[in-house]
Amino acid sequence: MAKRVLVVDDEKSIVKGLKFSLMQDGMEVECAYDGEEALNMAKANQYDIILLDVMLPKFNGFEVCQQVRDFSDVPIIMLTAKGDDMDKILGLEYGADDYITKPFNILEVKARIKAILRRNSKKEEKAERPSTIESGDMKIDIESRRVFILGKEVKLTAKEFDLLELLSMNPNKVYSRDKLLNIVWGADYPGDGRTVDVHVRRLREKVEEDPGEPKYIQTKWGVGYYFAG
């Protein structure tokens, strides 16, 4: 999905230039020209990042940043016309993630935006990733890479754990043998689908009460394997 950016500056030529350049990179760009308008837009919409000028009519950039932080942790990059370090320090103290001094190079602005979005994306992935998965009698500790059945630890090889982790974190999603081989063993691995079959069989022998009638790792005939969630 396209990233949504709010550009806030009372200099229309700057707003126009930023909007044009960011849209060329496939971003959705909305604009505000004073602090009050920026605050209202930030409350009414979900943005991936805000570019916020310090010197604004109605509310200045610091006031906007401070108030946005009361209801959102959206990344904010302050735009300051001064080389004064105090502006930068104030911006960061009010909750800004970064600052850029005017006049700026648009390539630098885009690089900073992308760096912050990448960091945020990784944080979100980490936050969404559970530390443990429990299903029936099975408990998978993702952090320590240990598996327990009825409270008793089951010893898995690294690849068996990788396979179980992938399937259990995506319950009911069917993976073909080729897809599993590619993700778990890597695109350069010289083996074939039989490698996956052997590991699934061994995994079932370790975690299933009856490997012939598996409860967790299911086969979708003619397609592949999935974890019954």
Image: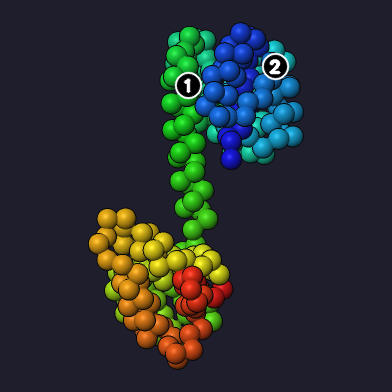
- In the picture, which quadrant includes the N terminus? top right
Label 1 residue SS: helix
Q: Tell whether 94 sits left or right of 188.
A: right
Instruction: Indicate the position of residue 72 as horizontal and vertical percent values.
Output: 63, 38
For the point 45% across and 10% down, which residue is it?
A: 83
For the point 56% across and 29% down, which residue is it?
A: 26
Residue 109 - label: 1
- Above or below for 227 versus 129: below
For the point 49% across and 51% down, which residue is it?
A: 125
- Above or below for 107 versus 225: above
Q: Which residue is mark 2?
A: 34
Q: Tell whether 29 sits left or right of 125.
A: right
Q: Give the amino acid type for the residue marked by disc 1 in the picture.
A: Val
Q: Residue furthest left?
A: 190
Instruction: Indicate the position of residue 187 as horizontal and vertical percent values.
Output: 32, 55
Circle 1 packing at 10 Å, graded few (<14), some (14-19), many (20+), is: some
Q: Tell whether 101 sits left or right of 6.
A: left
The image quadrant of residue 52 is: top right
Residue 227 - label: none
Q: Give the amino acid type for the residue marked by disc 2 in the picture.
A: Asp
Q: Nearer the viewer, mark 1 or mark 2?
A: 1
- In the picture, which quadrant includes the C terminus? bottom right
Q: Is residue 168 visible?
A: no
- Above or below for 90 versus 224: above
Instruction: Indicate the position of residue 195 as horizontal and vertical percent values.
Output: 31, 72
Q: Tell whether 28 sits left or right of 200.
A: right
For the point 49% across and 58% down, which residue is it?
A: 129
Lower position in the chain sequence, tag 1 or tag 2: 2
Between residue 204 and residue 220, name the one nearer to us. Answer: 220
